[in-house]
Image (tube, rainbow, N blue to C red):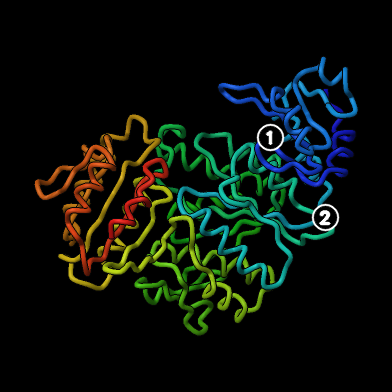
Amino acid sequence: MIDIAALYAQFRSATAVSTDSRQPQDGTLFFALNGPSFRGRDFAPQALAAGARHAVVDDNALATQDPERYTYAPDPLLALQELAQYHRRQLRIPVLAITGSNGKTTTKELVYTVLCRRYRVQYTRGNLNNHIGVPLTLLSIKPAEHELAIVEMGANHQGEIELLCQLAEPTHGLITNIGKAHLEGFGGEEGIARGKSELFRFLAQTDGTAFVNTLDARLPELATVVAERITYPGPTDTYPAELLSAAPHVVLRLFTGAPVEAQITGGYNFPNLAAAAAVGAHFGVSNDSIGEALASYAPTNNRSQLVRTTHNEVVLDAYNANPSSMSAALHSFATRPGASAAKVVILGDMFELGAESESEHRALGQLLQTLPLGTVVLIGSHMQHAAVAPGFHYFPTKAEAATWLREQHLQGQLILIKGSRGMGLETLLEHF
């Protein structure tokens, strides 16, 4: 067993925690995590030479030879998680956990933007939302500096959210929605619902507070186990909101007040904006400050970005894709003002669907046939199953699609680009 109190003393003396020897160290506590093709202890001397003050390794001989610079842990990842949990228990601040099938990163950033109007907030940076990222986020919270924390939790199989809750011990929780994401790992839609609702079950056991999106039919039922529930955005909910417009930007009315125009596109982002407003109101942020914060948020990282090029207008939503988010994006795009003939959708493979991949891509193709769209471009090996109509343009690779798009010289078009992260479809933007 590792002495967590002793390790915590090392942490308190360090500038930060690191798991990557290629990054600047400068006084860090380095955890030598193992990977599928490498052993972390091999990089520990490199981290120390670069300025780390101490390293946690699974090499007892190394730690015995130089105990001033090394601590032995049979499993450095478990040591990192236990340290993060220990640190969390020293904190006396609210911790909000956010998970869901779609929109959790956007919601996290919106919530952060709102809460910063009143509090000093620490939150998950980038996509550090897994069994490694959550401990790193927790260990970045400074008791004397931060008044509230937001922890994003991602998962692709059951049990992961439960583990992350055990580490972060959230006092508040929000599930954005239950959709068709990571079907392969969760074992179908029912598995997704059970996995994501592990957050609500944790809050029920710890007398926490749940923020409940009543637009998702499953969430109110899943949240009944939690005694303290804050609902949004229905007219009779705790914090009502109304979608006034979805294009070119989302315009919404909060709590029967004045309309707020966000810099984000797509009606599917309305619940994300409403969630941030509900959280902000619950924590005492004024209505005016909430509206100003939502209006100031500008999406980045290929998430619901509205990009105006020299010749076209592009909805760039290429950070991720699954059947639920793809359907929502397409329905929203199809209802945008403008002639259907001038609307172009460029879609890439949806990953991690397992045995459901073929049927889900085929269902996507059938959906596309029902929508008023001018040009449909499908890219990737899985998308061959969506190419069910003669008028669809199918390309096995992104390079082939890029060649075709260059030859089209598109002008005056409204274009949607969406696909799973591994497709990297944002690189197609240069052709418009």
- Callout 2: few (<14), some (14-19), or many (20+) C-alpha neighbours within 10 Å? some
Q: Which mark is residue 21?
A: 1
Please give left or right for residue 114 compared with residue 176 in the image.
Answer: right
Amino acid on which the number 2 mark rests in the picture? Pro
Residue position for label 2: 143
Residue shown at 58%/42% (left/top)? Answer: 198
Residue shown at 34%/62% (left/top)? Answer: 315
Residue shown at 33%/56% (left/top)? Answer: 430
Task: Return the x and y of residue 21 as percentages of the image width and height.
Answer: 68, 35
Camera-side residue of 311 and 300: 311
SS at mark 2 in the image: loop
Task: Return the x and y of residue 9 as percentages of the image width and height.
Answer: 89, 39
Camera-side residue of 264 and 192: 264
Image marks 2 and 1: residues in contact by CB distance under 8 Å:
no
Q: Is residue 391 above or below residue 239?
A: above
Q: Which mark is residue 393?
A: none
Quarter where residue 31 is shown: top right
Task: Return the x and y of residue 133 as percentages of the image width and height.
Answer: 63, 42
Amino acid on which the number 1 mark rests in the picture? Ser
Lower sequence index among marks 2 and 1: 1
Task: Return the x and y of residue 402 as percentages of the image width and height.
Answer: 25, 48
Q: Is residue 36 above or below residue 301?
A: above
Q: Quadrant of the C terminus?
A: bottom left
Please give left or right for residue 358 compared with residue 268 in the image.
Answer: left
Residue shown at 60%/67% (left/top)? Answer: 113
Q: Quadrant of the N terminus?
A: top right
SS at mark 1 in the image: loop
Alpha carbon separation for disc pair 2 and 1: 26 Å
